[in-house]
Image: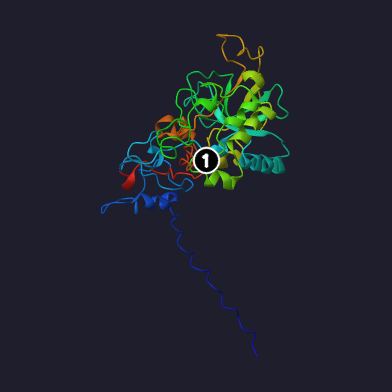
Amino acid sequence: MPTPVPVPVPPPTPLPVPVPTPANASCTKYAQGPYAQCADNCGSCFNAGARSGVICQGGGLSATGYLCPPDASNGDMAFACMDWTFGSKQMQEQEELFRSRTGADVFFGVGSFGSDDQQKGLGSCVRLVVDGMGKDVIAQSINTGSDVSGNQFDLQVGDGGAGLFNACAGGSSPGVNSMFSGTKEAWGNQYGGVDDREDCENLPLHPAMDGPMKMAGDDLVSLCKYSFDHGARGQGGHNPSIVSIGRVQCPAELVFMTQMQRSDDPVGFTPQSPMQAEHACQADIPNSPLDWCLTRMMDCRKPSGAWRSAVVPELMVSGKKLVQTCTSDGYTRIDNQCGCFDCDC
């Protein structure tokens, strides 16, 4: 019997290349009206594909997402997040994840760093060696301030001082237009907060909307004490001296906290050419500049990095163009993919 000749099997017809699901598909939650465009095209959403969150009803169709206002006006208001604070339980967990991944044992933080780049340093991370702190600090700049110089870092710590804008305390409707109940007196100085560790005891423990902070295991008194205990501030309102500072890659674990990431980050977590301090911090000398000082703040207010107008799109990673802010409880994230309903913005 003749051996059968194998019949060649034609190659399978290639499947059509699937059309990728647009990263902005989740922007459909901004479709509100009968002629909404978000269901099909969310291209007007500046931060499409960002991490989800609750919708801000900021008093109108043009006051939601990244346009959620920093002040209450017949609607919701955006706040800074309390778990960004130096020493929060979540920050400590992220530090441990980073140490496990890289072997680098550092503190994490956020705040303001004066820079003359295209977006005033927003989104960039720096590594600081600070006199008296047991570990280096890798901190991300998510805010700007005209009073913050290029060799100074203004770190968010528990009751670090509200500065010009206080969304933490003193509001007429706590939980609506201020995060915490009570007056401003217990919070100490407008710039710097309480002077001494024992003064932390007078602070309110939790925001007016206290559930999420309690669930996270944080309280303001402990966060305030943590900043003293780990050298981020000293007794008598003392500001520590920065020994060196230089830009580094933003750790994924820190980006998780802020949801802001630049596309021009350097590679690695050790600065290549850090600036070395020219002198110690002279903040204790009246009218002296704050260069080479680790200063501090906590105003609970929506930071500069949460505004579309503050960033250069080409410098940012898609879906991580803006800082993701919180509701008045300080922990619940606000969806910041779009700036208004129906994507007409």
Q: Residue at x 33, y 46 (%)?
A: 341
Q: Nearer the viewer, residue 218 or 17?
A: 218
Residue 306 lies, with reference to residue 192, above or below; the image says: below
Q: Nearer the viewer, residue 263 or 76?
A: 76
Instruction: Pick the quarter of the image with the N terminus.
Output: bottom right
Horizontal relation, residue 162 to residue 100: left or right: left
User: Which residue position holds label 1?
Assistant: 259
Residue 12 lies, with reference to residue 201, above or below; the image says: below
Q: Quadrant of residue 340?
A: top left
Instruction: Pick the quarter of the image with the C terminus.
Output: top left
> Which color scheme does this rendered protein use?
rainbow
Residue 44 lies, with reference to residue 298, above or below; the image says: below
Q: Nearer the viewer, residue 244 or 266?
A: 244
* Badge 1 amino acid: Gln
| Residue 226 point in image, percent of width and height | 66, 32
Residue 289 lies, with reference to residue 223, above or below; the image says: above
Q: How many residues crowd mark 1 within 10 Å: few (<14), some (14–19), many (20+)?
A: many
Q: Residue at x 62, y 19 (%)?
A: 237
Give SS at disc 1: loop
Residue farthest to the bottom, as pictured: 1
Q: Quadrant of residue 214?
A: top right
| Residue 96 point in image, percent of width and height | 69, 42
| Residue 149 point in image, percent of width and height | 54, 18
Looking at the image, can residue 274 be seen?
no
| Residue 268 point in image, percent of width and height | 65, 34
Looking at the image, can residue 210 be seen?
yes
